[in-house]
Structures are given as C-alpha cells and as structure tokens.
Image (cartoon, rainbow, N blue to C red):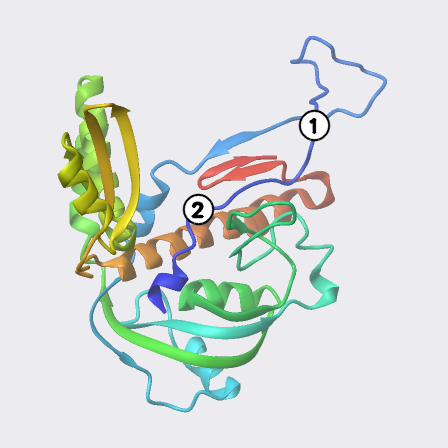
C-alpha cells in the first residue's frame, strides 16, 4: 500500500506558450493589455515538509468503521499535529462543476500511462480516483476544495511526531551561514540525502559481475536471476543479475508523507494565495515540484 502511494514530484506545463507584455520587456506593445510572467520557487520545499509531523512507529490497520461518514469525522478531528496520522486508500469523485476552476492544477495527481506513451508519469487530472492512496492531510485539502469521498477501502494508522525537525533546521541554519559553495552544497546534501533514503526502491537493485572468461560467463547467464549482459570487448563483459533476496529496510512511509505534504503547500499557494488574490487575471503556466511560473 505504501509503495503504491509514492508518486514522485509533479511536473507539468499548463500552458503551451506565453509572452509577457510590459514596459520591462524590449518588444513591449502599449496597444495591447499589460501582462507579466512571475517565476517563483518554494525554497527547500522538501526540507519544509520534513519538519512536519512524520510517521515513526505504531503502524496498524485502522479498526474503526470504514464507512464514509465515519472517516470524514475522523479526518475532521485530525490536524497536521495530531499524534496519530493516517494513509488512506480511497475512491474519490471529481465533480464536473469543479473542472473549469481546477483545470490548471487538479488535486490528487496520480501515476498513469498517458496516451502515446508506455511509461507511467505523474499526471494531475480531473478523473475520478479509484483505490487512490493518499496522506490524510492531502485528502483533507482535496475534500475541502470540493472533491467527494465516495468509498474507503483501507486505512493505515501510525504514530507521528516532528522527529526530523531539529536535524533539518540545523542543516538549514548551517547552510544559511556557510561561507563558501562547498559548505552550502554539503548542508543541502545532508537534508536531501535523508529524503533520498526514504524514497529508495530496493526492488530495482541489481547485482553486477565483471567476467573475463567464457566458463564463468555461461554459468552466470544460466542462472534464473540473469537479466542482461553488457559486452565491453571480447575479453570483458558485465553480467546483470536480479538480487536473490530483498530486504525491505527503507522507511518509504516517510518518503510518502514528505511527497504528499509538500504538494499541499503548492496547492495551497496556488488556490489560496495566487488565485484568491488575482482571480481570473492569473494563469498557471508551469510547475515543477517547488517551481511555480504564472
């Protein structure tokens, strides 16, 4: 369930083309309406999310009633600082009445294969969600925006606390006070490396063996874990083997929480700051994780 919940960061171009028209650009045309392009970035977005309440232990299936009314009450009574958090597998409806309003940045993006492609990508879309796994804070945000909870399949509960906060804030402070590029990059990496480990997919691991003789090469190719071979020359090759045994020892539940919580900031900024302030005078052009162009 948690593996299915990890979706990655959202990258999308909401507009194919845009051109600013104001007195700061060389080809300004005063006869046309004035327009601007704003490039904004949420600095240290994942660091911000990692300072929030993160799952830590006490994982178990929620034993209460899974009917929609009960789960809505559960969500209403929970907030970002609740000692118990939840990830939920749900069906959600995206009302037709919200499609125009949410067209630029639909809630609850999902991994899917787009038309004309064979590779799954994270796509923000206006379709109904089926068995969608989501952090409770992201679900609360989507429901508040008007999406409808139709069915709850499973709920995983866990204890949570801001156990990463002091570490993240220390590195952020050290980065701010750094005197050179090496120190700035080092303390940035100290945060990013932790996030990377919470996202590590052990299923994709391979064993690599260099071989220089035909006998060893044939022996490895005949293994049922053989995957591929890279031939460098007539005397050297690299055998790719699947791992015989996997150890699931990475805290991917933390990576899941970081990704979902970080998205809530972008959605909140777009709908509750930019759209609320500028209304129909703003159009989202592009977003990439923490980057926002409108």
| Crowdedness near tag 1: few (<14), some (14–19) or many (≥20) residues, C-alpha within 10 Å | few
**Residue beneath the point at 62% across and 27% down:** 37
Quarter occupied by the C terminus: top right
Q: Residue furthest top?
A: 26
Earlier sequence position, callout 1 versus callout 2: 2
User: Label 2's element?
Assistant: loop
Q: Does the rendering let one see residue 207? A: no
Residue at image coords 28%, 52%: 201
- Numbered mark located on residue 245 in the image: none
Task: Indicate the position of residue 92 as horizontal and vertical percent values.
Answer: 57, 72
The spot of residue 288 in percent (x, y) is 49, 38
- Can residue 149 be seen in this snapshot? yes
Which is more foreground, mark 1 or mark 2? Answer: 2
Question: Would you identify the image quadrant in which residue 3 lies?
Answer: bottom left
Percent of width and height locating residue 68: 52, 85
> Residue at the spot x=18%, y=29% of the render?
186
243 in relation to 87, above or below? above
Asked if the residue at tag 2 contacts the one at tag 1, i.e. Cβ–Cβ closer than 8 Å, the answer is: no
Check residue 9 in the rendering and tell me which mark sits there, or answer none.
2
């Amino acid at each position: 369930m948690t593996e299915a919940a990890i979706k990655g960061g959202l990258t999308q171009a909401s507009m194919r083309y845009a051109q600013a028209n104001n007195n700061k650009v060389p080809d300004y045309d005063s006869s046309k309406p004035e327009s601007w392009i704003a490039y904004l970035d949420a600095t240290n977005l994942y660091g911000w999310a990692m300072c929030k309440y993160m799952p830590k232990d006490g994982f178990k299936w929620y034993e209460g009633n899974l009917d929609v009314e009960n789960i809505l009450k559960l969500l209403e009574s929970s907030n970002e600082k609740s000692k118990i958090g939840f990830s939920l597998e749900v069906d959600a409806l995206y009302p037709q009445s919200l499609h125009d309003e949410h067209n630029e940045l639909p809630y609850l993006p999902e991994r899917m294969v787009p038309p004309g492609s064979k590779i799954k990508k994270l796509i923000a879309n206006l379709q109904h969600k089926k068995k969608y796994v989501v952090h409770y804070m992201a679900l609360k945000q989507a429901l508040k925006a008007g999406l409808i909870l139709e069915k709850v399949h499973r709920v995983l509960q866990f204890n949570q606390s801001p156990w990463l906060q002091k570490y993240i804030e220390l590195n952020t402070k050290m980065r701010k006070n750094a005197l050179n590029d090496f120190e700035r990059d080092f303390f940035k990496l100290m945060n990013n490396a932790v996030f990377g480990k919470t996202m590590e997919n052990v299923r994709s691991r391979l064993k690599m063996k260099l071989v220089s003789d035909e006998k060893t090469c044939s022996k490895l190719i005949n293994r049922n874990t053989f995957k591929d071979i890279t031939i460098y020359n007539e005397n050297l090759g690299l055998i790719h083997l699947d791992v015989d045994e996997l150890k699931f020892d990475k805290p991917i539940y933390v990576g899941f929480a970081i990704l979902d919580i970080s998205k809530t900031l972008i959605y909140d900024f777009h709908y509750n700051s930019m759209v609320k302030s500028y209304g129909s005078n703003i159009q989202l052009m592009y977003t990439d994780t923490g980057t926002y162009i409108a």
